[in-house]
Image (spheres, rainbow, N blue to C red):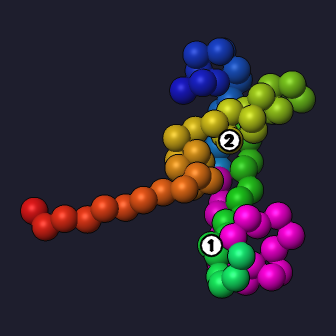
Amino acid sequence: MYAERKEIPLDAIEIRLEHGRVHTDDCEDCESEGGLIDEIHGKIRLDGDLDEAQRERLMYIATRCPVHRTLTTETKIRLSEA
């Protein structure tokens, strides 16, 4: 949507994610102490006739999307019976 609006020649995007659990003792940049945390590794492939500035901007925009923001902030899930 962003690329289309800014007329960036993006033909396709491929996103690959791997999910795992790591112990906080093995994580240098983790805020939690003790126990296991979820860790997601991602790779994004951008296809199209893009210059370096466009690639950098699209990668930045990927960190601002609602899904990324939800996964990187504290989330509370409250369930109730319907």
Q: State the image coordinates of residue 47 (x, y, percent, origin top left).
A: 73, 39
Residue that sits furthest to the front in the current view = 33
Looking at the image, residue 5 sits to the left or right of residue 25; the answer is left
Toward which corner of the image does residue 55 lie, by quadrant?
top right
Q: In the image, is residue 19 above or below residue 72? A: below
What whole-number distance in Å separates the C-alpha atoms at marks 2 and 1?
Answer: 18 Å
> Visible in this render: residue 50?
no
Front position among marks 2 and 1: 1
Q: In the image, is residue 35 above or below residue 38? A: below
Q: Secondary structure at mark 1?
A: strand
Looking at the image, residue 26 sits to the left or right of residue 19; the answer is right
User: 10 Å neighbourhood of mark 2: few (<14), some, or many (≥20)?
Assistant: few
Residue 8: which numbered mark, if any?
Answer: none
Q: Which residues are magenta?
A: 15-32
Q: Nearer the viewer, residue 20 or 46?
A: 20
- Magenta stretch containing residue 22, yes or no? yes
Which amino acid lies under the numbered mark 1 shown in the image of this protein?
Asp
Residue 38: which numbered mark, if any?
Answer: 1
Q: Residue at x 68, y 33 (%)?
A: 61
| Residue of label 2 | 63
Q: Residue at x 54, y 26 (%)?
A: 1
Q: Are marks 2 and 1 in contact (CB under 8 Å)?
A: no
Q: State the image coordinates of residue 24 (x, y, percent, origin top left).
A: 74, 78
User: 10 Å neighbourhood of mark 1: few (<14), some, or many (≥20)?
Assistant: few
Toward which corner of the image does residue 62 lie, by quadrant?
top right
